[in-house]
Amino acid sequence: MYVRGAYTPASSRASEDDFVSEIVLENLKDRAVTIFEIYLKIGHNYYVQIEDLGEQPLVLKPFETYRKEFGPLEFYAVNANKIILNDLLRDPAVKKRLVLSTSDGKYKVRSRIRRWSPIVEMFQNHLTGVVRPISSTIKNTYVGGNMAYVIEFVGRDGKEEIVPIHPRDYELKIFKRFSLSAKSLKSKADLEHLLHEQMDKGNLACKSFVVYDLNELRKEAHDFYSGQVFRAKRCSAFQYYVMGWAATKYSDWKLERENARRRHAQQEKQK
């Protein structure tokens, strides 16, 4: 048996207790592994149950990867008592490892999956940018930022179809028996009126439809990302590895100095 694994520790304002937010197990052998329980062993004597798979054991197939996410919890318990594990979970000197209950007995996950994240590099060099694509989806269909509406049609046979609509689609032949007009794309109500009109004329063969105004759906995301829009520019190796590194060290030094002043001021107030 050779199972490699990793876990992600996390904290949340929703819970006083730190918790495991994610586990990943990877079977590196050409034989299946049956897993009944997954534990995180803390130090020598604590086993935190991460997942109980007793009723439906996990069969990790050859060379298969298993990933599971978890959320905040109420509290930890041992026997009939509550127990607080934060000090041990946060202490890097306390050894932690995943342990599996398998059909072959106890198995200690011996090697960690070497996961990499650019977030680490971002803290080491502030010129590092972690860019995330922000997408809009309707019924698992990706909708681009230039689209104005999405129409969800339900056919007479019950089959669903998603049709994105561009603001200039009145220039194209989107539907077989009728065309969109510039006026019909001015608002959601205008588009719905046109579609109902074409249904009454028999030019639109569907049982029902729903029109989504993408500007309304996008509002939350656009309000959140409301900062300055800038165009990415090329960063040379010297700028990144030398100037960026030096600027980051200076910024970290200033922050630590300010934190030290605050701690000193707080201590003076408590005297």
Image (spheres, rainbow, N blue to C red):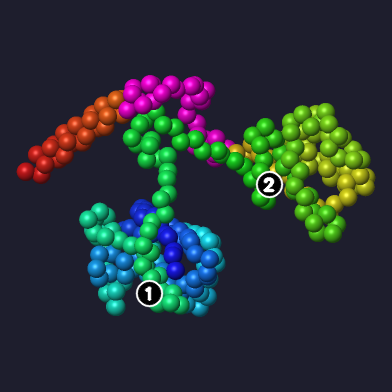
Where is residue 70 drawn, in percent x and y? 44, 60
Which amino acid type is marked by label 1? Lys
Q: What x and y, as percent, mark residue 64?
A: 54, 61
Residue at the image position 83 percent from the left and 37 percent from the top: 174
Picture quarter containing residue 176? top right
Magenta range is: 219-245
Location of residue 217 in the rendering, given as x and y in whole percent from the top left corner? 62, 42
Residue at image mark 2? 141
Crowding near pointer 1: few (<14 within 10 Å), some, many (20+)? few
Q: Is residue 76 visible?
A: no
Q: Residue at x 78, y 42 (%)?
A: 192
- Number of on-image labels: 2
Instruction: Report the mark closest to the observer, 1 or 2.
Output: 1
Q: Position of residue 117 (x, y in %)?
A: 42, 43
Q: Earlier in the sequence, mark 1 or mark 2?
A: 1
Q: In which quadrant of the rendered view does residue 189 lie?
A: top right
* Quarter of the picture holding the C terminus: top left
Which residue occupies 44% across, 32% down? 129
Please indicate, yes or no, whether residue 132 appears anywhere in the rendered image. Answer: yes
Furthest residue in direction left, as rendered: 271
Quadrant of the rendering where the N terminus is positioned: bottom left
Which numbered marker is on residue 106? Answer: 1
